Amino acid sequence: MNAATDRKIALLRGINVGKSGRIAMADLRACTEAAGCAEVRTVLATGNVVLTDPRPEAELRSVLETAYAGRFGYDAVVQVLAREAVEDAVARYPFATLDDHHDYLVFSDDPEVTAVVAEAMAAAVDPAGTEEVAAGSVCVYWRVPRGLTLSSAAAKVTADRSHGRHLTMRNIRTLRKVLALG
């Protein structure tokens, strides 16, 4: 096992949002370890898991989705990325951070979906505003004014049912915390 290349980040979509479907991070770590992963750590209570595992990302995603669905009884959606890919994506964030804005990376498991979503989000942005969208290699970069994360025209693209299973979004501050775990 090559610890550097085997270090991965699993991003779960839609856990611990609202009052139902709460998952304790200790239980999430235990389930991830039972699925064969090592050095498992979680960040915040929103489904950010740092782990070591030699399996390819697609295979590990399938294993984790099956394990989480079985243990927690929900339709688990997991993005699995190499730690280096997340680190590179964060480093390439193209927009200046502005007060009263959120800086997001919208990850997709499918490069075609990433391209389609980036194009649709960019087309939806008001050119007179401060919202920005750009395509990245493994994500869509998005800066959005606070209060518009769920309601801007670009946000509505991410909520489209045809993309939902392919996307998960993280604030860049959260990703920096995830990366700090190694």
Image (cartoon, helix red, strand yellow):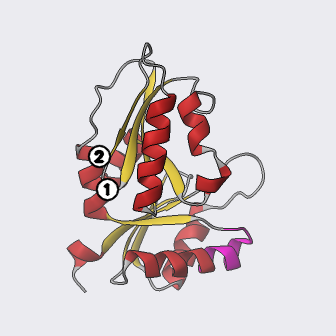
Q: Which residue is mark 1?
A: 86
Residue 98 picture quarter: top left
Question: Which quadrant is the N terminus positioned in?
Answer: bottom left
Measuring from the top left, give residue 3's x and y in whole percent.
24, 77
Q: Residue at x 29, y 76 (%)?
A: 6
Q: Is residue 147 above or below residue 167?
A: above
**Residue sitting at the far top:** 128
Query: Within the image, what quadrant is residue 80 found in?
Result: bottom left
Q: Which residue is mark 2?
A: 90
Q: Amino acid at mark 1?
A: Val
Towards the viewer: 107 or 173: 107
- Crowd around label 1: few <14 · some 14–19 · many ≥20 (10 Å): many
Looking at the image, is 113 positioned above or below residue 62?
A: above
Q: 182 left or right of 30?
A: left
Residue ID at (57%, 40%): 157
The foreground one among 9 and 182 is 9
Identity of the amino acid at label 2?
Answer: Val
Q: Which residues are magenta?
A: 67-75
Please, what secondary structure does the residue beneath circle 1 have?
Answer: helix
